[in-house]
Amino acid sequence: MSSLQSKSMEVEQIKIKEPGRFQQFWRSFHRKKPAVISFYFVLLLFVIMIIGPFITPYDAAEPDYNSLLETPSLTHFFGTDEYGRDILSRIIAGAKISLSVSVSAVSLGAIIGTMLGLISGFIGKWVDKLIMRGCDVLFAFPDLILAIGIVAILGPGLKNVVIAVAFFSIPSFARIVRGATLEVKEMLFVEAAESIGAGRMRIMLKHIFPETLPTIIVYFTMNVGTAILAAASLSFLGLGAEPSSPDWGAMLSVSRDYIGTAFHLVFFPGLIIFLTVLAFNLLGDGLREMLDPKMKD
Amino acid sequence: MKKFLGFLFVLMLALFSVACSGDNDSNAGNEGKSAKSSEEAGDKEITIAIDQNFITLDPHNAGDTVSIFGIRSMYEGLVSFDENMEIIPALAESYEISDDALTYTFKLREDVTFHDGEPFNAEAVKVNFDRIMDDANNLSAKRSLQFVDSLEVINDNEVAFKLNEPFSAMINKFAMVPMISPKAIEEGTKYVEGNPVGTGTFKFVEWKQGTILEVEKNEDYWGGDQTNVAKVIFSPVPENGSRVAMLKTGEADFVYPMPQQNVKEFENSDDVTIDESPSTIARYVSINTFKDPYSDLKVRQAMNHAVDKEAYLQVVKDGFGHVLDSTMSSETQYYSKQEPYEFDIEKAKALLKEAGYEDGFEAEIWGNTSSETIKGMEFIKQQLAQVNIDVTIKSMEEGTLSDEIYTPEKPEDAKVQMWYVSWSPSSGDADGATRGLFSSEYFPPNGANTAYFDNDQVTNWIKEANATADTKKQEEIYTDLQRTVYSEAPWIFLATDINLAGRSNNLEGVYVAPDGSVNISKAQVK
Amino acid sequence: MWQYLVKRIISLIPLLLVVSFVVFMFIHIIPGDPARLLAGKEATVEEVEMARQSLGLDKPLYEQYFVYLKGLLSGDLGYSIKSGAPVSKLIGDRILPTLGLTFLSILWALIVGILLGIISAVFRNRWPDHLGMFTAVSGISLPNFWVGLVLIQLFSVQLGIFPTGGADGWKSYIMPSFALGAGIMAMIARFTRSSLVDSMKQDYIRMGRAKGLGSGSIVFGHALKNSLIPVVTVAGLQFGFLLGGSVVVETVFSFPGLGTLLIDSIQFRDYPVVQAEILLFAVQFILVNLLIDIVYSFLNPKIRYE
């Protein structure tokens, strides 16, 4: 109990000097080189996502049957694909789709999972049992099979890919948030708030949720990478984003038949997926070390 | 000191793991080579990599091409197809058709025994016939014999099939009905499915469901020594890249289909030849003529004019194919060439303007999840965009797709607008290439008329062609029919395939028939 | 201990019932008609209807479920719609290759993962750490179908070392298990690192240092033993996911395992096979969880059987 007490004391203190904490955070974050590089890379991706349409050298959707499968050159830095479309332009244009699909899928999963986790951990008893058993059932389904089923039920399309990917991230968020909630719940200040007579909802949102936030952020960051890969796997099975869209996963899976003849078709989309997922993962690792109280220096 | 020991331990672990993996690699290399050389020494075993799994080995219940050709390696019918899908005698020496086209009399070979030693004779044909016609068995072969009324055993080596109405494609259908050993039939359906016993050049060895099918040479084949291959393994490999890789590494001796985009990789190969052969597969986009705006002929014509078929061949088929210039492939019976819709954007735009769709419309195209279908649908989308038709691609899993297409009971309930699909008449006959696709009696769920093409004249023609035994008359009817349907544009007519197979140079005699089935009965390894 | 085990196993039964129900409903909701797929595209309505009747698919859903449940309770998994073979035989044929693949994947992932984790933890925030984590995380940053296809190009086509697919001999297991295990390796490396860092900071290790123990013996004597717990958890959980998640990798390598069987069966709406397979995944998932709990209690006696 003594360590928990000291932790809550620490939290109270920090709340008073908010800006100081941020600076401190930033300084120590900058010591983690991979995480910092990743952070800037992710930032760059989001910039590209916004200004993408203005900087593509060619129209990403415009086929040119006179320049099919051209290897990288000065006119087409990344070459052209099987319809003569400029691959660099497609990758730039695809940032928007790939990132928004993964981020919104994980957000959706995180929101629902967090709510379930908070409720489960805070209320406990049969509600907890019910939610956790529900998660067990979901866990028991292989991820991809669940996604295939959902896409088959809802029909193809980006929106349904988001739902499918979100669906299988729900139980893991619920579990993690529940765990964090249980820990926080035991802390003194919640008990204090309870004794003052604050409503359950209020305690949950005002006191418990902020404490679980670091865990959620870390898990969120790492899951974005996983979501990009999951969406790509769905594309591999022909159930992902519309194949003509420049979604990275779709580009990679549609062009995979050219792996032996025109390697640049699979190399560049593969590279950008690799770098992006890597960046999100390394960033998540860095953040976890920063935010996880157990791992702070 | 302890610190040092710790590091030493880590270091050793690392070295150990590296050493281990290095060791494994060199072993693997050696073994790989030795395996290959023993193969070259000539135990005459070949592997055929195909893109789909066998669904069933029951010869009376197989509907898909892959199962059918797997079965044909072990079974034979009274007649069979040659390389060009012409009918040749097989278990029957000869046959005769009566003038009213109602009686088919077969004279059976006398020297044939099944793989289990049972003799092949009129009684065996009767047992097979009874099995198929028994409703309780619910076998798909019954469809081939739907016009057959009864079977008469004339003597031990002669049988006569009596039809209740004439059917133009009847003789082709007999080639679709392989003969099973009566003893196996006696054992029941489950036995037949798991233990093929036929008369073919190869005998059944093993089928690991969903994976390989293994057959061995039938030393007692009635036709003599047709092949020098002792063992054939059919190996389903759905992923294109993996299948091609198998041909390169020599793990497979014959690969079908050979993805067209990979053909280039073998241009300068000394070990592999790419075999091209004509195909009955027609590729098209069916247009739901029951739905607006597709109910307007001008719209459908415009769509046909808006698609550049030559570009389609280059981009989607890598040059391997022909423009589909009729409602069926040039390899199909009674094919008659039509004047293709020329690629003309202005004309397409003008037609759309006349129809009142100057600004185009939004459309949806459906197809399965195979990479070639997806590629084709992307191409259609790009082409139709030129005339402001904004197409959304929906690729669906085969199961979902077939449900969406065949569930609607009435044409007005159908949600399908365009369907990117292909058709190949299983027995290469004109009836198979028209009835199910264009007769108004065959709207889903009854048949595959997914264009909901409704033309009384065409429906009647199809019936008339079946009712006559006069081949001249049949040809006339099918010529008229193709002209009418082509001009009505219920499809976007795209292409006829060229079957592509990759073959190792020391293998001969294995070929792909126009219907896409792999024939191994005369396989020779050099 | 035994009492605890029995209690745990009994509590599994309702969970399995729920899973069987959810699985059944889930796959029957997915659009698709096996009767239509079985009868073929040229089939008439009557033929499809007959196929449906002979498969028992014309009955109301709840009745079908009870028929299925009854069979299940008496140990009968039914027959495949697609091939007519007993489901138990289909799964029996495929389970060994997939289990082998899974074990091999976990094995190399554990060895390499723990090694990288240790290196990273010992050199925390220095370049070996960064390099180790970069290597590890690379493993979960590529779509595994892509890794598989590149491996085939490289090791089968170019170098001719490994066969492109199948499950003939140990060599055909190497590439799929590499593609499959890369992700687990990354996860294990990260967990080993973080839990090592964590336990190295704990009081008794500080005590150990104060007593003059070298860092090598701290890592191996104390910290590693403690941090094995989360590592075991991760490996165990991954074991469950692997069996189900090998669908893509098995497809790329045309590996005759449960993954390819599942994808084939889903495509054909082969309900009995899909049901049995997902149920199997559920059972092994639950068993693995149970096993983890038991291993936990061995490694850390402080955890009580509650």
Image (cartoon, coloured by chain):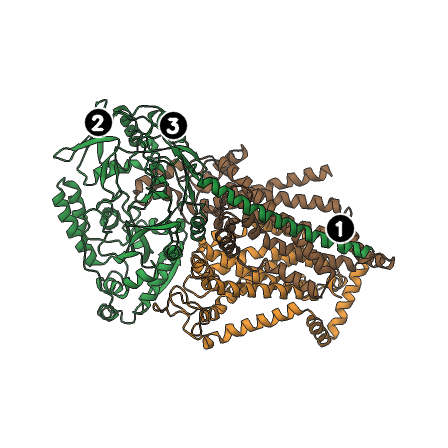
Give the amino acid at mark 1: Lys
Residue located beneath label 1 in the image: C225
Any idea which chain is the brown one in this picture? C
At x 47%, y 77%, the residue is: A55
Distance from disc 1 to disc 3, alpha carbons, whole Å, reads 61 Å
Chain letter for the residue marked with disc 3 in the picture: B
Q: Are marks 1 and 2 in contact (CB under 8 Å)?
A: no
User: Is A215 displayed left or right of B418 in the figure?
Assistant: right
At x 39%, y 38%, the residue is: B56
Q: Quadrant of residue B91?
A: top left
Any idea which chain is the green one in this picture? B
Give the amino acid at mark 3: Gly
Q: Position of residue A111 (x, y in %)?
A: 58, 62
Residue located beneath label 3 in the image: B188
**Colour assignment, chain A:** orange
Chain letter for the residue marked with disc 2 in the picture: B
Residue located beneath label 2 in the image: B159
